Image: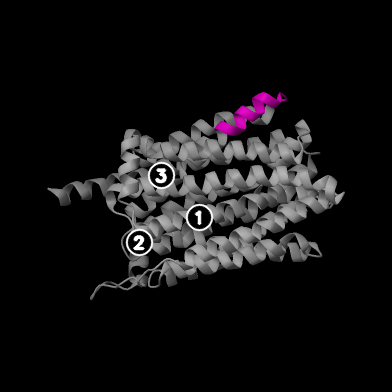
Amino acid sequence: MINRWREDWRSTSAEARRYLLGCAFLGAAGALPWTLLNLYLDRLGYSKIEIGSVSSMGAWGTILVALPAAYILARRRAARFLAGAAFICGIALFALPWMPSLGWLRAAQFVVGLSFAIHHIAVAPFLYRHTKARERQGVFALAEAVGTFASVAGSFAGGQLSELLSPILESDTLSLACVLSGAGFLGLAAAIVYAGIKEEDPVAEEGAPKILDVVKKHMGSALRFVAPHVVLGIGAGACIPFLSLYFRERFGLGDGQVGALWAAGGIMTACGYLLAPLVSRQLGLVRGIVALELASVVFFIVLAYTNHLAIAVIAFLFRGALMNSGHPLFMNLVMKVTPEGAKEFQNGMQSVAWSIGWVLGPVVGGAILDSTDNNYSLLMMTTVGFYVASSILTYVLLLPLERRHNEQELESSE
């Protein structure tokens, strides 16, 4: 397996490698608000539903920009969009904690979500164009792993730095604000790296079908991918934003301990990403996705009901590793099955689907916590229900697509 990774890396293009460096900076930048923003908002005195409304604004940004960006990216250089998105992200992250009201906080989070959406939509087509079939699955997984390992560093450093600054600034809230604002510099560093990528505009072959014609023909398959993604997004959005508060309120963890825990979770998640190609070779893409999702549900149930910190930490680590390791399999399936000319559109559709879930989920999760006196067990079991439903939809709707595509490849090779 190590030799396979080494060979994949040697054959990877310079453009893809430069993307991985920029991805590391942006991954660290995104980890800081992901880990600390809700702790900061809680210290400002906002309710759970208000905190959820701020979290959901990032998803609104994705919904607004995803499909227009996907349409444009089908005929434009993705590197430009990567650089522009990282620049916007850096400015918004720098300003985020200094916003004077809840409305301004929502606006800043909206811009952060919009910029990350552009980046996310550009990534899959960019890597697809700059990798060969042999190393493609490995590079997709490596891209996820690099971003995750960077987020590990960001989460750990952010939590520790917040606790270090707190006595110096004589304010937990101000120390969190300073650390959150520092994420902006990491976003700007990513923009500088991406700006150095040299790339030609995608060349449309003479007589190639127009993108809208391809999209219309592909719409039935596109909706099959969207349905399980929406359900999964609602479940994740309802619970994941509140996990930092769960550990603080149920177990009394401090900011530094939460940051260290998120860092450990990132390491486990990255390990899961690196194992994704092995899972796909053993089970196939769809069966691999479903197996990983259902395995993660077991640990989510443990997390919901345990009152022992050690057990909760173990469940948290394995839940995240198993659930997230299915993502590179899912994105490879999307790129594999979707025809040329519709890949960017499908990627945009997936971003919209996920974001719909994250628009609804955090508000629903906040409402559950506010109305049940912070009953995290009920919140997590609600998420479990959505995860199981998503797994069923994935198996029923996507396995026929994978089988059909494999049969077509086999016929074309004969």
* Whether residue 269 is situated above or below residue 132 in the rendered picture: above
Q: Give coordinates of residue 196: x percent, y percent.
A: 45, 67
Q: Can residue 220 be seen in this view?
A: no
Q: Callout 1: helix, strand or loop? A: helix
The magenta region covers 306-318
Type of colouring:
one colour
Q: In this rendering, which labeled residue sits more in front, label 2 or label 3?
A: 3
Residue 218, numbered label: 2
In the picture as drawn, the residue positioned furthest to the left comes out as 414
Main SS, magenta residues: helix
Instruction: Determine which residue is flagged by label 1.
Output: 23
Lower sequence index among marks 2 and 3: 2
* Whether residue 162 is situated above or below residue 60 in the rendered picture: above
Q: Is residue 87 visible?
A: yes
Lower sequence index among marks 2 and 1: 1
- Residue at 81% x, 39% y is 373
Question: In front: 116, or 189?
Answer: 189
Contact between marks 1 and 3 (CB within 8 A): the answer is: no
User: What's the distance in space between the residues labelled 1 and 3, CA to CA?
Assistant: 19 Å
